Amino acid sequence: EILKTVKKGIVEKAGKSAGGRDIYIVRYGKPNNLNRSANLSSALGAKDAKYYADKTGADYRPTAFIVGAVHGAEVEGTAALLNLIKIIETGTDFVGNENPFLENIVDDYNLIIIPCANPDGRARIPHKSFVGFSFEDFRYYGQGTWKNGELCNWPDCKKIHPIKNAADFLGGYFNDDGINMMHDNFFGEKAPETALILETAERYSPDITILLHGCTNANNHIINAKYVPEHIRERTHKFEEILKARYEAEGLPFNVAPMKLQENQNPPAPFNLNSAIYHINGELSMTFESNQGLNYEGISLNHDQIYRLHIILFEETF
């Protein structure tokens, strides 16, 4: 319904999920002419990334790519993105809050939004939010159950992939084929949802890509891309520090992880969707993990706090 109201941007029915559900992209701004003559790998082989994306022109518009509901039960980002679209279109969010900065952001910047990247997983979730829910309820809807009825839990839900034939109830993590797109086969046959995200990241070469996730009652934090150059790690860490200062000023919790090469651990960190995005466009790519407000140990935020986390994230992204 909110996408029907978009007038300042372009709404595209960009693809279909494994289960045949529509996936939408919303684009704001003016497309850049990147003067592309090579893919990123070949351009770097030629010693200059501009052959993949020339961003030196005076009319170049920095671009952000933000993706909601990569995991279908992690709905906080989708709710925030729909509010962001409403702010851009009308000047206020769904409860009437004004935000002139975000309202006018597309005058100077490009913004690409996939509000719900995993409509298959989202379709299995009968709830609008998990605020106040038990940990077990969230695990059931998030990761599903094994054939014996036991909760799949995390990270055991990743030990069989695709998980479809091993699951009794397929949780919202997965598309209808049982694929968790964060750990898809990026160098082989990919899920259509994964392929769409990567194609978008390559076509537009966004300066920053953020995948919006939920992390039960853990502290809010960013997970950076692994197997990337030091300057990308440093820029991500600087962004984390900026976010932390904003959140602390409003009494919102946020954790900045120390910079370390998790690739050197045993076992090493996985090469996941954020890593793949970096290696296809050479720019910042990260996961934002939001608290989900469960009735459970740890930190439990309410709807207003969770929403505010995302609005600050969007502001600092630009």
Image (cartoon, grey):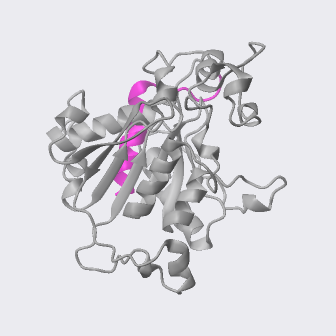
Over which residues does the magenta segment extend? Answer: 297-318
Q: Residue at x 61, y 38 (%)?
A: 180
| Residue 96 image offset from top left, x and y in percent | 20, 30
Residue in the foreground of this view, choosing between 87 and 275:
275
In the image, taking residue 106 as reference, residue 298 lies left or right, namely right
The quarter of the picture where residue 56 lies is bottom left
Count of picture labels: 0
Q: Residue at x 79, y 62 (%)?
A: 264
Residue in the foreground of this view, choosing between 162 and 64:
162
Residue 152 appearing in the image: no
In the image, taking residue 94 as reference, residue 275 lies left or right, namely right
Split into 4 quadrants, where in the image is the C terminus? bottom left
The extreme top residue here reads 149
In the image, taking residue 288 as reference, residue 13 lies left or right, namely left
Q: Residue at x 21, y 44 (%)?
A: 88
| Residue 215 image offset from top left, x and y in percent | 59, 34
| Residue 309 image offset from top left, x and y in percent | 43, 40
Residue 39 appearing in the image: yes
The extreme bottom residue here reads 47
Split into 4 quadrants, where in the image is the N terminus? top left
In the image, taking residue 191 as reference, residue 15 lies left or right, namely left
Q: Is residue 261 magenta?
A: no
